[in-house]
Amino acid sequence: MVPRAWLVRSPLDFKKTMGGHLYDWHILPSLDPRIEPLVRRTAENIFKDLVDISLDEEGLVASYLDGIEPELEVLDEMGFMIFALETSGTWHSEGPLGKVAVPNMKRVTYLITVKNSYFRIGREIAPEHLVHRFDANCEAAVREIASALGKQETIGSFYSKNAVLTAHEQNVPWCQQCCLNEQLG
């Protein structure tokens, strides 16, 4: 299945991301120690009960979404957003009963990042590592994040266009789809 992505700004946006079997979340990039505890606690408050929510229980879903609305507002006011990515496939595990393969598992990964920020895959600056926006409509960006998460590769993020330009010494391999404006201007 092709990975799907959403930018989560409201409880209704968040509802679109529910219904997975596995959930995880990460904060990108490393944060200033003065704000990290607040961002982390806010994220913990958003995600702590998610695994217990079934879309079949409409009242519980509504209550959960009402409960996370203030937390989403806090992230927004602090200049952060949530990029949600859904992937699916066969989940493999090995435990006391041996190897287990569970088909059709949906995993949703939530990346908390600075609004309007950029990313590239990998630690090294290289022409083949395109710079993207966290843009749910950019198929290449969504594919690259899904692949990186699956392979546990580094996702390098940048707060601003100037940070990208500086890191790449003004020679940036911009994505043609989500960063066209950056290339032209």
Image (cartoon, rainbow, N blue to C red):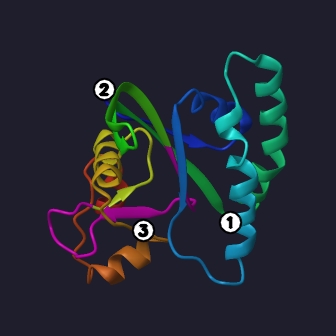
- Which mark is first along the chain, 3 or 2? 2
- Looking at this rendering, what residue extends furthest in the front direction? 96
3 versus 161 height, above or below: above
At horizontal 36% and vertical 34% (from top left) the residue drawn is 3
Q: Are marks 2 and 3 in contact (CB under 8 Å)?
A: no
Q: Are marks 1 and 2 in contact (CB under 8 Å)?
A: no
Within-10-Å neighbours for mark 3: few <14, some 14–19, many 20+: many
Residue 90 placement: quadrant: top left
Q: Secondary structure at mark 1?
A: helix
Q: Secondary structure at mark 3?
A: strand
Instruction: Give the residues drawn in magenta, as a range.
Output: 109-130
Q: Which residue is mark 3?
A: 157
The amino acid on which the numbered mark 2 sits, given as a three-letter code, is: Met
Q: Is residue 100 left or right of residue 135?
A: left
At horizontal 36% and vertical 56% (from top left) the residue drawn is 181
**Mark number displayed over residue 4:** none
Q: Position of residue 28 (x, y in %)?
A: 51, 66
At horizontal 67% and vertical 21% (from top left) the residue drawn is 55
- Which mark is first along the chain, 1 or 3? 1
Q: Quadrant of the C terminus?
A: bottom left
105 versus 123 height, above or below: above
Judged by depth in the image, the label closer to the viewer, 2 or 3, is 2
In this view of the protein, can residue 78 be seen by the observer? no
Q: Position of residue 184 (x, y in %)?
A: 30, 60
- Which mark is first along the chain, 2 or 1? 2
Q: Which residue is mark 2?
A: 1
The amino acid on which the numbered mark 3 sits, given as a three-letter code, is: Ser
**Mark number displayed over residue 40:** 1
In this view of the protein, can residue 51 be seen by the observer? yes
Q: Is residue 74 left or right of residue 139?
A: right
